[in-house]
Amino acid sequence: MKYYSDLTNKIYDTEDDLKEAEKIHNEKLEEKKKNEEQRKADYEKVREAYKLAEQQKKAADKMLMEFIEKYKGIHETTDKGKVLSTRQYLENQKDLWNIVFSSFPFIF
């Protein structure tokens, strides 16, 4: 007598073979479900980290604007004799921020 499994869609010679195959199949499904839940939890951590980074960036930008208003600009010496104007400084910061976030792949 042959036995057919609806779970594995295969035919088995003995009932014991069928039960063993279904048991293995169910274990694989449970493992896959567990891995998917872990992936979702890890992705939520990544999303929270990006939200926190965005909030910190906004706070830093606000502080920078307050500093610029208070002191009428920024002059940062990067090399001897090389002074950045406020516009150059802001452009460099913007480019740096874009580089940082473009180097991390987004997970979908």
Image (cartoon, rainbow, N blue to C red):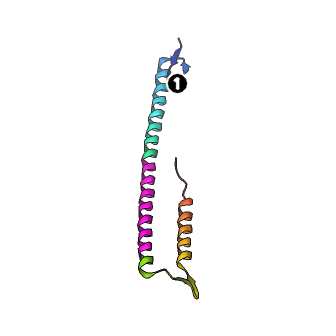
Q: In this rendering, is residue 74 above or below 101? A: below
Q: Residue 45: x and y, percent?
A: 42, 52
* Residue 71 colored in magenta in the image: no
Classify mark 1: residues with Cα within 10 Å, few (<14), some (14-19) or many (20+).
few
Where on the picture, by quarter, is residue 53? Answer: bottom left
- Percent coordinates x, y for residue 14 in the rendering: 50, 17
Viewer-proximal residue among 32 and 48 = 48
The residue that appears at 55% across and 54% down in the rendered structure is 105
Residue 60 counted in the magenta span: yes
Give the number of callouts: 1
Considering the whole magenta stretch, tell me its main secondary structure.
helix
Residue on which the image places disc 1: 8
Please tell me whether mark 1 sits on a helix, a strand or a loop.
Answer: loop
Name the residue at 45% across, 77% down: 68
**Residue at point 54%, 22% (across, down):** 9
Vertical order, 17 against 104 (above or below): above
Q: Please indicate whether residue 60 sits to the left or right of residue 95 in the image.
A: left
Does residue 106 appear to the left or right of 65 in the view shown? right
Q: Is residue 100 above or below residue 67?
A: above
Magenta-drawn segment: 41-66
Q: Amino acid at mark 1?
A: Thr
In the shown orientation, is residue 47 left or right of residue 13? left
Q: Please, which residue is most extreme toward the top here?
A: 1
How far across and down, in percent of the image, does residue 54 sit? Answer: 45, 60
Residue at image location 53% in from the left, 52% down from the top: 106
Q: Position of residue 33 (x, y in %)?
A: 45, 37
